[in-house]
């Protein structure tokens, strides 16, 4: 495992900005995504009951609206739209960096492989056909290795962050119900990993 991490690190260390964006903003984007349904719930509860829900986040949102001179009936929908736009923009920003890193890793892997192949002697080219070498340099690097090296890693990271923030959001709504629904996950993860 250390060899694989060292292999990827020699490419990632050349792009600290992109790596920082992917590591730091992926959880922020997941957090914003989990807050959107909660904001809808606050708006519906306000329309139904005529009062702001007692949740801390709802009070904070309404407090921001009050500071801007807007009541909850005006600010909750505006906050939902603003949070949706910010969430979408952040998602596009992070995904753009991930796609850029996929392409950059694709180029770096291909360059490394090409440099290695050009140092080989004639026996290597007699043993492997040109089509096989070209397939390795195009399909295997582009379609598999470069994608898994960035998107594969950071999609897993995004999914774990999303699950963590969803569980936090569920705990803020009803801890007992969260325990009943999330407790089976603890038992299903080891059984799912044994299937693979």
Image (tube, rainbow, N blue to C red):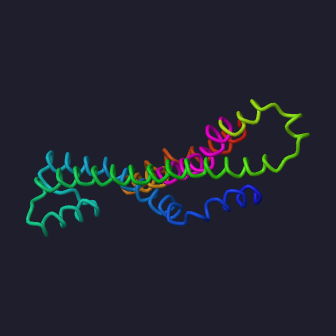
Percent x, y of residue 174? 38, 52
Look at 26% across and 47% down and name the residue there.
41
Please state which of residues 24 and 41 is positioned toward the viewer in this rendering: 24
**How far from the left and from the top, in percent, is residue 45?**
20, 48
Q: In the displayed image of the protein, which residue is found farthest to the front?
A: 122
Whole-percent x, y for residue 58 in the image: 24, 59
Q: Nearer the viewer, residue 145 or 42?
A: 145
Q: Position of residue 185 (x, y in %)?
A: 57, 45
Q: Is residue 103 above or below residue 60?
A: above
Indicate left or right for 34 with 12 as reference.
left
Q: Which residues are magenta?
A: 139-162
User: Front-most of 10 and 60?
Assistant: 10
Residue at 22%, 62% in the rendered image: 61
* Residue occupying image coordinates x 9% and y 59%: 71
Q: Is residue 98 left or right of residue 47?
A: right
Q: Is residue 157 magenta?
A: yes
């Amino acid at each position: 495992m250390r060899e694989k991490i060292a292999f990827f690190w020699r490419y990632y260390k050349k792009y600290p900005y992109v790596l920082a964006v992917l590591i730091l903003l992926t959880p922020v984007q997941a957090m914003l995504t989990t807050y959107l349904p909660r904001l809808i719930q606050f708006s519906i509860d306000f329309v139904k009951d005529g009062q702001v829900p007692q949740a801390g986040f709802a009070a904070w949102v309404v407090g921001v609206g009050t500071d801007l001179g807007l009541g909850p009936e005006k600010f909750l929908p505006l906050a939902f739209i603003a949070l949706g736009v910010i969430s979408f923009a952040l998602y596009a920003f992070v995904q753009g960096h991930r796609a850029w890193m996929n392409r950059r890793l694709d180029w770096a892997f291909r360059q490394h492989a090409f440099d290695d192949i050009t140092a080989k002697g004639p026996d290597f080219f007699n043993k492997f056909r040109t089509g096989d070498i070209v397939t390795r340099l195009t399909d295997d690097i582009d379609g598999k290795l470069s994608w898994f090296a960035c998107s594969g890693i950071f999609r897993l990271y995004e999914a774990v962050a999303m699950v963590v923030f969803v569980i936090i959001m569920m705990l803020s709504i009803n801890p007992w119900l969260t325990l009943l629904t999330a407790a089976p996950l603890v038992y299903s993860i080891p059984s799912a990993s044994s299937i693979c």
